[in-house]
Image (cartoon, coloured by chain):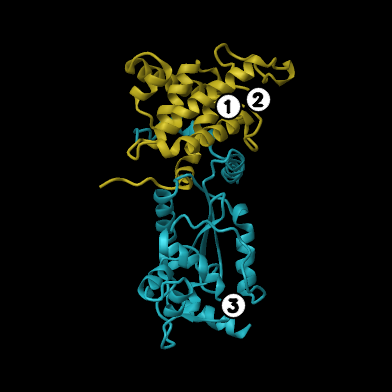
Chain colours: A yellow, B cyan
Amino acid sequence: MTRTKEPFEAVVAEHGATVLRVCRAVLGPHPDAEDAWSETFLAALRAFPGLPADANIQAWLVTIAHRKAIDITRARQRQAVPVGEVPEAARPSGAAAMAGSQAGAGDPTAGDGDVWAAVRALPDKQRQAVAYHYLAALPYKDIAALLGGSTDAARRAAADGIRNLRTAFAGAAAKGADR
Amino acid sequence: MTSTVGEPGVSALLGITAPGDGELRRLHDRLVTAADEDGILDIGYTTIDSPVGRLLLAATAQGLVRVAYQNEDHDRVLSLLASRISPRILRAPQRLAAAAREIDEYFAGRRTTFDLPLDFSLSHGFRQLVQRELPQIGYGNTRSYGQVAAMVGHPKAVRAVGTACATNPVPIVVPCHRVVRADGSLGGYAGGPEVKSTLLALEQAA
């Protein structure tokens, strides 16, 4: 039996939250993450009629989101970022994509700030691998195709990333207990 | 799914990346606006409440393409629109604002004709010919299937007129409910016979 394609509204309803989480994990709690979401779903809507009916829609959306996030990061790097917008701590190398840890995420608690600092501190590939695998269940071979390198390298990046986050959280929690 | 239960890194990440209140709704609205501007919102739809139950309204850029009763199963109707016209379908109440208003006015007894652009691309040939002709039957009047067959110049095509009425993609707006049997009994209706008699009674009372 041929699978007929569902209305795009159902795609947004089913995957909208996951794609937003991925954009936010990769770009930070910043309006850029919402821009990436919007551009992802607009591009997906445009291409949707040509998508094979048996395609893995979530993997397809994450692939688009990955490219849109890169476009946004490059555009951001081309613009001179005013010093005043650089978040509290010096921005770690490799994390130019993360900005404004307090913006756009409602009213984050101090704990959220610690978590964002840990996410921001990850090397880009670890942060992307963690977001794509742990938030969107993207298989490692698909992550490897997006990030370059082998499937094993993608698996290692995700594992290293999640370990680095765990260590950072343990440190932050200990610091919080001292306060 | 990956087994991530109990992984503190993952739960913290899920916590901080969660969508805010109303955030996805705002993003959805923004998507609809951008898609409409880019000309890739092939079908917009909404649902409205009416005295004959919840109605699905769907429109292409050309006009109203489908009105569906609840008993037709709105999800199924949207899936059919996806396969027959385009899957680029989003909930977009703005596109249906005029249709929703005119249907409200009709049920309030304040409107006797509809002034809406229509898209007949769901029907073809003789069916579409009949459906385009139905608005000639004025508010509060009825015609038999045979009379409609004569109206379109095919007096023997009584059964085909019945099929054309039964497959009318935009009931209420295209008044197939005004076509009844020659003996005065109601005949079939997509929304059910009660809905047909409700509409005819509404038009008699106004």
| Residue at figure coordinates x 54%, y 13% from the top left | A94
Q: Position of residue A149 (x, y in %)?
A: 37, 13
Chain assignment, label 3: B
Q: Tell whether label 2 touches label 3 (CB within 8 Å).
A: no
Q: Position of residue B66 (x, y in %)?
A: 49, 59
Q: Residue furthest bottom?
A: B183
Using the numbered discs, state the Cα–Cα distance from disc 1 to disc 2 in whole angstroms: 7 Å
- List the residue tagged with mark 1: A28
Left or right: residue B31 compared with residue B121: right
**Element carrying mark 2:** loop
- List the residue tagged with mark 3: B139
Three-letter amino acid code at the position of disc 2: Gly
| Residue at figure coordinates x 42%, y 56% from the top left | B75
**Which mark, residue A100?**
2
* Mark 1 or mark 2: whose residue is earlier in sequence: 1
| Residue at figure coordinates x 63%, y 82% from the top left | B206
Q: Position of residue B170 (x, y in %)?
A: 50, 64
Q: Tell whether label 2 touches label 1 (CB within 8 Å).
A: yes
Using the numbered discs, state the Cα–Cα distance from disc 3 to disc 1 in whole angstroms: 59 Å
**Which mark, residue B51?**
none
Left or right: residue A90 compared with residue B51: right
Three-letter amino acid code at the position of disc 1: Gly
B78 is higher (above) or lower (below) than A64: below
Q: Quadrant of the C terminus of chain A?
A: top right
Q: Residues within 10 Å of mark 2 (few under 14, many from 20)?
A: some
